[in-house]
Amino acid sequence: MEHFTGPRGDHDAFGNGTNTQAHRINKAMTTTPQTLKQISEKSNVENLDRIRHHMRWLAERGFAGQNEASWALTEKAFCKFQEKRFPLSKSGM
């Protein structure tokens, strides 16, 4: 799956501005559940508290969900990414 983040330093689909840690965390996320440690390894963000905080931020907005010790993207996150990549035309087609 491609990711819903913009180029490093640009705003991403979640309004994260220039926070490169948030971008790296977002890019590591998939719809497959992952532990914070797995996200840390993929994103190269070693601070698990920072990742946990960001995951809660995503969850509050409906972009991620937690199942026990794992986190995954929701369909809403995927749809937001798709909408950004392929905006609907004015005619809806």
Image (cartoon, rainbow, N blue to C red):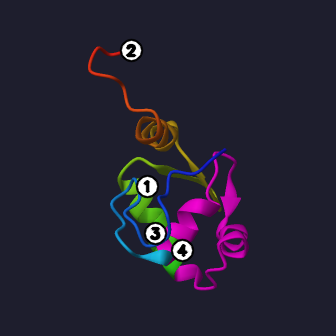
Are the residues tagged 2 and 3 within 8 Å (C-beta)? Answer: no
Which residue is located at x 50 percent, y 80 percent?
50
Which residue, given by chain and number where applicable, does mark 4 sit on? 51
Q: Which residue is mark 3?
A: 54
State the CA–CA distance, disc 2 to disc 3: 35 Å
- The CA span between labels 1 and 4 is 12 Å
Taking the spot 64% from the left edge, 85% from the top edge, the residue there is 46
Tell me if residue 71 comes above or below residue 53 in the rendering. Answer: above
Answer above or below: position of 65 versus 12. above
Q: Is residue 37 shown left or right of residue 66?
A: right
Residue at image location 54% in from the left, 61% down from the top: 26
Image-based side of 35 in relation to 62, left or right: right
Q: Are marks 4 and 3 in contact (CB under 8 Å)?
A: yes
Give the alpha-carbon distance from disc 4 to disc 3, as whole Å: 5 Å
Q: Main secondary structure of the magenta part?
A: helix
Residue at numbered disc 2: 93
Q: Could you tell me which quadrant the C terminus lies in?
A: top left
Q: Identify residue for label 1.
A: 59
Number of labels in the image equals 4
First in sequence: mark 2 vs mark 3: 3
